[in-house]
Image (tube, helix red, strand yellow):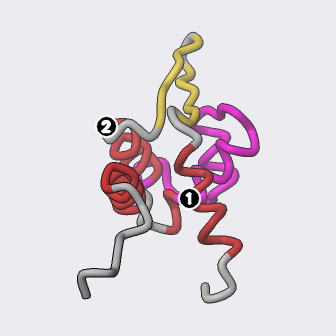
Amino acid sequence: MSDLHIRLEQNKLEKAAYLLKCVAHPIRISIIDLLDQSGSLNVSELQDALRIEQSLLSHHLTNMRDKGLLKTRREGKNVFYSLADVTVTMIIGCINSCKAV
């Protein structure tokens, strides 16, 4: 057993685990995918694309922003959301390309 080594660095494992916990919901993964494609979207645009209630969307957006996954920009009455870090899209891309899923 002593010859076995962890191939990934501990800090990368911790960051990946944190990000996976933060996005471990189909709606959150969909939000990330939409923002990855578009750059930034406001709540109405996200709601139209996801076809979910505004209160549910706001809950997920607030949670993701509080955990540092999203950043916001205000233009008048609109708040635009964008990804704070593209690392999460790389992790989701790896999962998406996995044949086991």
Q: Nearer the viewer, mark 1 or mark 2?
A: 1
Q: Which residues make up the magenta segment?
A: 29-56
Tell whether 73 sits left or right of 16. right
Instruction: Check the image and name the residue furthest to the front.
Output: 3
Q: How many marks?
A: 2
Amino acid found under the numbered disc labelled 1:
Ile
Mark-to-mark CA distance, 1 and 2? 20 Å
Label at residue 73: none
Numbered label attached to residue 91: 1
| Corner quadrant of residue 77 | top right
In the foreground, 6 or 15: 6
Q: Which amino acid type is marked by label 2?
A: Asp
Q: At x 34% / y 46%, what residue is drawn?
A: 63
Image check: 91 left or right of 99? Answer: left
Relative vertical location of residue 89 with respect to residue 98 in this rendering, above or below: above
Q: How far across and down, in percent of the image, does residue 6 sit?
A: 36, 70
Q: Quadrant of the N terminus?
A: bottom left
Secondary structure at badge 2 equals helix
Residue 38 position in % (x across, y down): 74, 38
- Residue under numbered circle 2: 66
Q: Residues within 10 Å of mark 2 (few under 14, many from 20)?
A: few
Residue displayed at 66% across by 61% down: 93
Q: Residue furthest left?
A: 2
**Residue 86 among magenta residues:** no
Q: Main secondary structure of the magenta part?
A: helix
Where is residue 67? Give x, y as percent.
32, 41
Is-magenta flag for residue 30? Answer: yes
Query: Which residue is rendered at x = 53% and y = 50% of the image?
Result: 88
Q: Earlier in the sequence, mark 1 or mark 2?
A: 2
User: Residue 61: image x %, image y %?
Assistant: 43, 43
